[in-house]
Amino acid sequence: MASNVVKKRLLVLGGNGYVGQNVCDAAIRSGGFEAVRSIARSGAPSAASVPDHLKKGMSEVEWTSGDVFDKSARDEAMTDVDAVVSCIGAFGSNEFMKRVCGGATIEAIRAARERGVSLFGFVSSAQVYEGSAGLRLPASAPMHGYFQGKYEAEQELLRSFPQGHVILRPGFVFGPRSVGGHTLPLQLVGRPISFVGTQMGPISSLIQSIPFVGKECSSMVPVECVGRAMIQSLTDLEAEKKGLILDAEEIRKF
């Protein structure tokens, strides 16, 4: 129950991003945290980048401007924090994606461990699992750096927080997304593909058998489920003292 984490303080890395906003909102709505804080280079998100249904929750977040690679800014943001969630992710060159999707979270994990943080959550990828087609992509292939970065961050988290980790492995995340004052209804794309990939019996099974594409089609999740899954899992973890890894099917239950 949320009461188990009353008086806990949460830090969300990348809380002004698409997924991060929903994690922050879920944390605020849960009522289980004394404070919800976020650090991002740009600080608080602009009003135009927050969907209307998230504006109230986002207004209650404590915003800190800073670079997660900057040790002093990172340490300041982690002051008196009990739990950290990393929603950091970006697209670009493989080198850039590996540094941002992996390196940034790895540094945060190590800093959190040194500062005595008890819980660490990470939004990873559906392609991070043993035998994944995504992890077998050649180094020159698009997205190689993204998946390898997420994989390396997962490994660091498992080593550093063996009993205190929550790892979510969603595929494409869909829902209302504000960009430049306009709302993109990503659910109009994600929901039908998710239905075909998971709810159409033999057709879904056939799709799922296709390397890489099948996993993506069966791993799409609503963004609000990602937020709720992360926060509720951190709450459950506080009581159970056992690390959790949730795939898309489990995330969609929230």
Image (cartoon, rainbow, N blue to C red):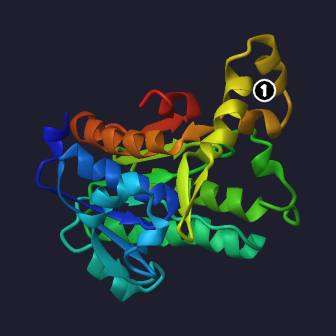
> Which amino acid type is marked by label 1?
Gln
Q: Nearer the viewer, residue 2 or 140?
A: 2
Badge 1 element: helix
Is the residue 45 above or below the residue 130 in the image?
below
- Residue 120 showing in the rendered view: no
Compared across the picture, whether 32 is left or right of 221 comes to: left
Which quarter of the image is occupied by the C terminus?
A: top left
Q: Nearer the viewer, residue 53 or 81?
A: 53
Q: Which residue is mark 1?
A: 208
Compared across the picture, whether 192 is left or right of 9 comes to: right
Q: Residue at x 63, y 54 (%)?
A: 151
| Quarter of the view holding residue 81 | bottom left
Q: Residue at x 13, y 39 (%)?
A: 3
Is the residue 51 above or below the residue 240 in the image?
below
Compared across the picture, whether 208 is left or right of 188 comes to: right
| Quarter of the view holding residue 100 | bottom right
Residue 229 on image: x %, y %: 40, 39
Compared across the picture, whether 90 is left or right of 111 comes to: right
Q: Callout 1 environment at 10 Å: few (<14), some (14 to 19), or many (20+)? A: some
In the displayed orientation, state which residue is furthest to the top: 201
Residue 242 on image: x %, y %: 34, 37
Q: Nearer the viewer, residue 52 or 110?
A: 52
Q: Residue at x 61, y 57 (%)?
A: 150
- Residue 203 showing in the rendered view: yes
